[in-house]
Amino acid sequence: MKITVITGSPRKNGTSNYMADEFIRGAKESGHEVYRFDSARADVKHCLGCNACGMGTKPCIHKDDFVELSEHLLNSDIIAFVTPMYYFGMSSTLKKVIDRFYSIDPQLKEKNNKGILISVQHASADAVKEPINAHYQAILSWLNMENAGIINAIGIESVEHMKQTPYPKQAYELGKNL
Ligand SMILES: Cc1cc2nc3c(=O)[nH]c(=O)nc-3n(C[C@H](O)[C@H](O)[C@H](O)COP(=O)(O)O)c2cc1C
């Protein structure tokens, strides 16, 4: 299968990128083709809400890294979102990328991709994960996508701490068993 992984952390060696690494390692071991897009280092401009794209009937006016990403999105079987939790939601760089889905919205809906969410949060309270999961599920529902897995790594202090938890193995196995 073809998998597009969109990461959301500006911290290259941070916790969510570690989870992305493990997920990708598992997926590649099982022969899947992975395209990784690090939103925090990409040149992706904000959606201007100008509607020049007609919500998917014409190209977006921005010519940036989203052009290449959109080709991968429309050729993928799975889109995996891997993000730190920022104020109960995904990071703004990841959200900025998702807002640009507007220009390929009908094509994405027709594609019937599967989705994956991997989030990392500092809070250990289980309920803190609910808003990000609800947002993810709403996006999936809108885009006619099916959920293929959610991992919420909670109570995470650092990468070293994360390595002591079951979460990296869960990410690896999620990729491996797709
Ligand atoms: C701007 C910002 C907002 C955050 N908001 C939350 C939050 O709402 N809930 C939470 O549990 N942790 C929150 N955190 C902590 C991060 O989610 C946590 O440290 C995560 O492991 C960072 O991921 P990274 O190492 O991949 O960058 C926040 C951190 C930052 C920098």
Image: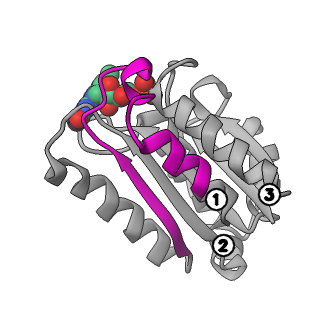
Identify the disc placed on residue 165.
none
Dot 2, how many residues are within 10 Å of its Cα: few (below 14), some (14-19), or many (20+)? many
Report crowding for label 1: few under 14, some 14 to 19, many 20 or more residues within 10 A (C-alpha): many
- Going by the numbered disc 1, the residue's amino acid type is Ile
**Residue at image point 54% right, 48% down:** 171
Per the image, label 1 sits on a secondary structure element best described as: strand
Circles 2 and 1, Cβ within 8 Å, touching? The answer is yes
Tell me the element at label 2. Answer: loop
Q: Residue 112's image quarter?
A: bottom right
Residue 77 % position (x, y):
74, 69
> What percent of the width, then of the height, locates residue 9?
49, 28
Task: Please tell me whether residue 113 is drawn above or below residue 159 in the rendered image.
Answer: below
Q: Alpha-carbon distance for marks 2 and 1?
A: 7 Å
Residue 74 falls left or right of residue 14: right
Amino acid type for the residue under numbered disc 3: Ser
Disc 3 packing (10 Å; few <14; some 14–19; many ≥20): some
Ligand 1 within 8 angstroms of badge 1 C-beta? no
Residue position for label 2: 113
Q: Which mark is residue 79?
A: 1
Dot in front, 2 or 3? 3
Numbered label tally: 3
Which residue type carries mark 2? Asn
> Whole-Å distance between the Cαs marked 2 and 3?
19 Å
Q: Cβ of disc 3 within 8 Å of ligand 1?
A: no
Of the residues under marks 3 and 1, which one precedes in the sequence?
3
Q: Where is the N terminus found, in terms of image quarters?
A: bottom right
Secondary structure at numbered mark 3: loop
Q: Which contiguous range is marked in magenta?
A: 146-173
Residue that numbered label 3 is attached to: 30
